[in-house]
Amino acid sequence: MKASLTACALLMAGALAATAAGKVEVRLRPSDESPVIEKEIYGQFAEHLGTCIYGGLWVGPESEIPNTDGYRNDVLEALRELHVPVMRWPGGCFADEYHWRDGIGPRASRPRMVNSNWGGTVEDNSFGTHEFFNLCELLGCEPYLSGNVGSGTVAELAQWVEYITAEDGPMAELRRKNGRERPWHLKYLGVGNESWGCGGNFTPEYYSDVYRRYQTYCRNFNGNRLYKVASGASDYDFNWTEVMMRNAARYMDGISLHYYTVLGWTGSKGSATVFGDDDYYWTLGKCLEVGPVVRRHCDIMDRYDPDRRVGLLVDEWGTWWDEEPGTVPGHLFQQNTMRDAMVAALSLNLFHTFTDRVKMTNIAQIANVLQSMVLTRGDEMVLTPTYYVFRMYVPHQGARLVPAEVDTPVRHTTDERTVPMVSATASTKDGVLTLSLVNTDLREEAEISVDMAGIKGSVSGAEILTASTAGAFNDFGKPQQVAPALFKGAKVSGGVLRAKLPPMAIVTISIR
């Protein structure tokens, strides 16, 4: 079967016609009116969970692991290559039990706490406000703060904002006492996290009132302008978005959405590395279902906000598998395979098509947790297949979207979701067209022709990410099992780009 649809609709609908398998046509439709792909679509998420912070990002200045003021040098270098635009912290579920005053002042005297959400690990608070904001400065990224609404007070959140951003006053004096003279910049402020669940088990009606109250007292100091984000829905809870938009849209700049590619929330979630073909295609179908989910939430938002002032932030997304055997329960350490890389590429391709409403997404999480960028063990670091997708897609950040129509064979999964053989996304910036193509088929190569629609140029560079099996992954001692390589199979002639993609491959092509 073969579908002929726009890039957005392709990922959300079924087949329209039948033609020869493996033959794919892509038609670019450049327009000066196309939206710019928000660079924040490539946001990251760092929670106090397992070894994401401690051991992943932070080892402390006294560590024998090479570091800069306590931050791992190898991880810093890797993350800089991703041009990380924004990082969300300190949670997640941890955020609504985090009291910011515990994480300031001399590290040796900071109080300890039990991280009751994630394995009962004792948290020593050595990584707090100063450490997070200094990390964001080192990486050149925007901080995105998740405020404690579930167990915190209005005054606590208001004073945290003042501590971070005020030039003068009691909170600014306290900040200076702790070693930071000038305020930090804070744009993104989340008012609670998953308030329907671990963030307080609120009803949407009650939380909308709580949100209105808390955001009122989060002030703008000294020209710092907060972008206030309401805690939004999980997956298919469209009523939550309906109530929040009806009751509180005028008080928010954004609302969140969480969507995980997961089998379910009870019982086994399946192995990250051992799975069959049906599992592989089910995973891709489930990840692509974020398309119709986002569309329906956007439709609800459009009724209350037709000018699209309020952004939708998919600030938790990615795969969620069983923890690796032998790891600490509750720390959510999972391996990261070529299958996860496919989920990352397909999801990013799709998020590009919603950039008029979706203003940020944050993959979960940045290190050692769920679908991470890096894995660390002692002084070793491994880059994951997902990391490489993000690195290959850097040119799309802040580029103008080039809409693409794709005629592609499709496959129906065991639960009748639809997976296209080929997904495509394209963008232009600084005289360069970047085209990213994904062949999802496990067995068959894809012969692709791309109508350039008058865009002139030649291939100036191309990379491919593929592997021997969908379960292939990088591990300590074997860090290059899945890594990008030069791709020489693309050529522009007569206004058409032609490329032959091997099975299960992600390719990014630059045309100058």
Image (cartoon, rainbow, N blue to C red):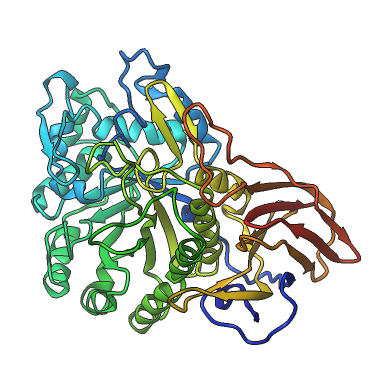
Q: Nearer the viewer, residue 204 or 254?
A: 204
Q: Quadrant of the N terminus?
A: bottom right
- Hey, which residue is sitting farthest bottom in the picture? 16
Asked if residue 170 shows in the view, the reply is no
Q: Going by the image, does 205 lie left or right of 167?
A: left
In front of the other: 13 or 240: 13
Horizontal and vertical percent position of residue 429: 68, 54
Is 429 rendered above or below residue 472? below
Residue 427 in picture, x, y percent from top left: 66, 60
Q: Is residue 47 above or below residue 104?
A: below
Give the left or right position of residue 482, taking residue 63 as reference: right
Q: Residue 479: image x %, image y %?
A: 54, 32
Q: Nearer the viewer, residue 409 or 131?
A: 409
The number of numbered discs placed on residues in the rendered structure image is: 0
Residue 77 higher or lower than 209, as above or below: above
> Image height check: is 105 above or below 304?
above
Which residue is rendered at x = 75% and y = 78% of the image?
Answer: 20
- Residue at image location 36% in from the left, 31% down from the top: 57
Residue at horizontal 11 percent and vertical 21 percent from the top: 109
Residue 460 visible to the viewer: yes
Residue furthest to the right in view is 494
How far across and how far down the image is residue 170, in percent? 13, 35
Pick the front one: 394 or 282? 282
Quadrant of res 105 = top left
Residue drawn where x is 20% and y is 56% of the image: 192
